[in-house]
Image (cartoon, grey):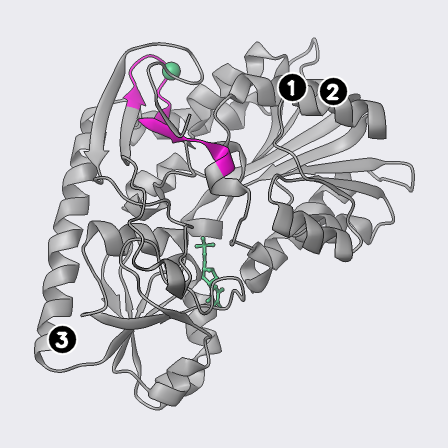
Amino acid sequence: MEVEAVRKCRICKSKRLYKFLDLNKMPIPNGFLPKESLKVPEKKYELACFYCENCGLVQLTTVVNPEIMFKNYVYIPSTAKVMMNNFSNLVYTVHQEMRFNKDSLVIDIGSNDGSLLTFFKSFETRVLGIDPALNLATVARMNGIPTEAVLFNRKTASSILKKHGKADVITATNVIAHIDDLHQVFQGVSTLLKKNGMFITEFPYLLDLVAKNQFDTIYHEHLSYFSLKPWKFLLEKFGFEIVKAQRLLIHGGSIRLTHKRKKKRSTSFKKTIDYLINLEKRNGLYDKTTYDIFAKNVDSLKKELTTMLKELKKKKMKIVGYGAAAKGNVLTNFFNIGTSVLDYIVDSTPFKQGLYTPGKKIPVYPENRILKDMPDYVLILAWNFADEIIEKQQKYRKKGGKFIIPIPEIKIV
Ligand code: TMP
Ligand code: ZN
């Protein structure tokens, strides 16, 4: 099936699902197009959210078949310094707590081009990547990272166990939200993890998403938007507990959680988790009206940004986009910003250059084009990397170029 409607919550199975924020139908946000496909009509899928009134999980109303989204994947984290620093920090933290040796095994779910595992490998431990994207698995293997090109589930976990044995550490950064069957994730992790092993996840944190108006991180690939209350409910079902939680600045606000199998005596870490869940409650994450307000704020932002861009175009200003991020494709599609506003978008990812964005069909070029063309304004669509981008484009700025950062609120630099 190409697309399926969600009928019950993927964590608690409740049918009490409250719909909010309808972003209209749009193509999958990483479905970049080559020139020869521009005339072929694109497939569009509903993009809207449910809030589970039972456990509090925010999730999409539909699931697009993962084969369509992930078989050939264009997103790689390794072009961003921020991401590499984050990986290095993660690996260092893990190493502090669990001194591994050459017999230890680290498995990364959603291993992409193997960049996280490369950091683990520098400790001379064994590593294994799991990622369904055939193009990326090839890149990873070429970089010396053994990779199984499969989707992670109960079945593939068992076959990996037979082939490679149990893992000391399992990581899953920015991938859990991609997976429909979360129960299978924990079953798979449970199968593969040693008794005292660590399971580390990182995902954008719903608390930040709501507080900072980050509506454009909502897209077909991200099936769930996690906060701690429903997450805790899920992992406890499978006998795990959180032993560490760190809020991160990455992707506009993420959370890194370290899990272990639950011991008889609860850890002292419970206090931090209770504190965070209370904070989530105080910020209205478990009150459905919060999500209606969130949707209204998105509409206000749409009005404000599109009015501003229209004014600039009236004044004959040249505007281009920076970062052909999936989130940028959500923003341009929902706000109806096309090539009459943005001449093109620049991006550091070689896989995206030369292609056109899904929906709005804006051409994507390498980053150096900015300095050559000197547009009047650059709209930073990859706002999560705004600092890194501005830093990189100091020359453009010194020559009088200006940046527009749309989120959390419009800012001109
Ligand atoms: P993401 O928000 O989904 O991580 O995507 C960010 C996009 O921004 C990705 O396509 C790479 C691009 N990018 C640049 O073009 N230049 C940069 O300096 C950085 C950090 C990212
Ligand atoms: Zn639920």
The count of marks equals 3
- Left/right placement of residue 229 relative to residue 196 reads left
The residue beneath circle 2 is: 158
Of the residues shown, which amino acid type is indicated by label 3?
Answer: Leu
Q: Is residue 323 magenta?
A: no
Residue 312's disc is: 3
Of the residues shown, which amino acid type is indicated by label 2?
Answer: Ser
Marks 1/3: CA–CA distance: 53 Å
Please tell me which residue is depicted at 40% across the width and 30% down the height of the picture.
Answer: 2
Of the residues shown, which amino acid type is indicated by label 1?
Answer: Arg
Q: Quadrant of the N terminus?
A: top left
* Disc 2 residue lies near ligand 2 with CB under 8 A: no
Task: From the top left corner, tell me how far across and down residue 323 is, in percent.
Answer: 40, 64
Query: At numbered mark 2, what does the secondary structure look like: helix, strand or loop?
Result: helix
Q: Are marks 1 and 3 in contact (CB under 8 Å)?
A: no
Query: At numbered mark 1, what does the secondary structure look like: helix, strand or loop?
Result: helix
Query: Which residue is most to the bottom?
Result: 399
Choose top left, top right, bottom left or bottom right for residue 240: top right
Q: Is residue 412 above or below residue 33?
A: below
Q: Is residue 58 magenta?
A: yes
Residue 154's disc is: 1
- Left/right placement of residue 369 relative to residue 212 reads right
Q: In this rendering, does residue 41 appear at all? A: yes
Q: Depth-wise, is mark 2 or mark 3 nearer the camera?
A: 2
Q: Which residues are magenta?
A: 51-67
Task: From the top left corner, tell me how far across and down residue 127 is, in percent.
Answer: 79, 42
Q: Depth-wise, is mark 1 or mark 3 nearer the camera?
A: 1
Q: Are marks 1 and 2 in contact (CB under 8 Å)?
A: yes
Q: Which residue occupies the foreground of this view, 35 or 273?
A: 35
